[in-house]
Amino acid sequence: MNYITRIISHIRYVNSYLFGTKLSSYQSKLNGKLELWLIDGKKILNSSNANLSYDSLHRVFQQIFRKINIQNKPPERVLLLGLGGGSVPCILLEELQFNCKITAIEHDPMMIELAIKEFNINRFKSLEIVEMDAYEYVTHCNKKFDLIIVDLFLDDYVPLPFCEEEFNTALIKLLDPGYILFNFINKNLAQANQFEKLQLMYNLQRNLLVSNYHLDGNNDMLVAEKIRN
């Protein structure tokens, strides 16, 4: 790294604490505009209207893991629907140092590319990344998991098929005793109504304990726990 490059890098770093520094932009066929920013000295990934990894979304999952006391019941088999830049694997494998196997389903090849290139997600050897539509994976899967995380967004909304009964019935069948964590953003009445219907659907299940946590910003997390009989 030459002198000029070091100076530019230093300016970007300092500026990241003041205003944030946009490092680059990408155009995804599935997720539209994606932006890589440097905020407080750390890279984060944003869509047009939401954080996708390592900023507010990262805090959301840190908060929910504390609220459900996940350290008292460390998961062994994790299904992550929606990889983003890799906040969830980072928290589980690096921050909490769990010895778990994570299967991450991500439909957007650009998201996978950014997770690897910009956030070095390949450093986690117990993380398997599958490029596939989450609906197709869940409705055809015959594996069992003790932690299932649904973080499926197009920008700041959850596509309707993932809130329908068919998908969630199939999802619940994949859960061994453990948790389903369904992340949602509530910014408007339509999103609030969608989340309310999702809660009702889960509350009608006899074998689940269902709760809702309001977290960082506009995020709500539906938590469904299946307890061993």
Image (spheres, grey):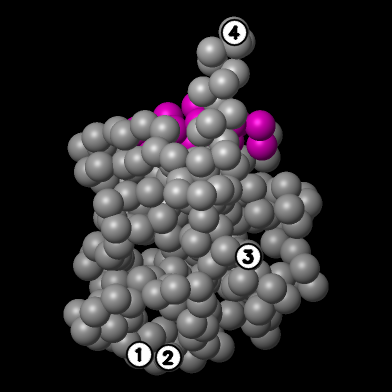
Q: What is the secondary structure assignment of the residue under circle 1?
A: helix
Sooner in the amino-acid sequence: mark 2 or mark 3: 3
Q: Nearer the viewer, mark 2 or mark 3?
A: 3
The span picked out in magenta is: 110-124
Return the residue at label 1: 200
- 26 up-or-down from 153: above or below: above
- The x, y position of residue 39, in whole percent, is 52, 47
Q: Nearer the viewer, mark 3 or mark 4?
A: 4
Residue 2 is labelled as 4
Amino acid type of the residue that numbered disc 4 sits on in the rendered structure: Asn
Q: Marks 3/4: CA distance?
A: 38 Å
Residue lying farthest to the top in this orientation: 2
Q: In the image shown, does 9 or 178 lie closer to the viewer? A: 9
Q: What is the secondary structure assignment of the residue under circle 3?
A: helix
- 224 up-or-down from 17: above or below: below
Sooner in the amino-acid sequence: mark 3 or mark 4: 4
Sooner in the amino-acid sequence: mark 3 or mark 1: 3
Q: In the image shown, does 114 or 4 lie closer to the viewer? A: 4
- The x, y position of residue 44, in whole percent, is 49, 45
Q: Nearer the viewer, mark 4 or mark 1?
A: 4
Q: Are marks 2 and 4 in contact (CB under 8 Å)?
A: no
Q: Marks 2/1: CA distance?
A: 5 Å
The answer to whether residue 211 is visible is: yes
Residue 218 is labelled as none
Q: Marks 4/1: CA distance?
A: 59 Å
Return the residue at label 2: 203
Q: Residue at x 22, y 43 (%)?
A: 32
Q: Nearer the viewer, mark 3 or mark 1?
A: 3
Sooner in the amino-acid sequence: mark 4 or mark 1: 4
Q: Marks 3/1: CA distance?
A: 26 Å
Q: Residues within 10 Å of mark 4 (few under 14, many from 20)?
A: few
Q: Residue at x 77, y 68 (%)?
A: 71
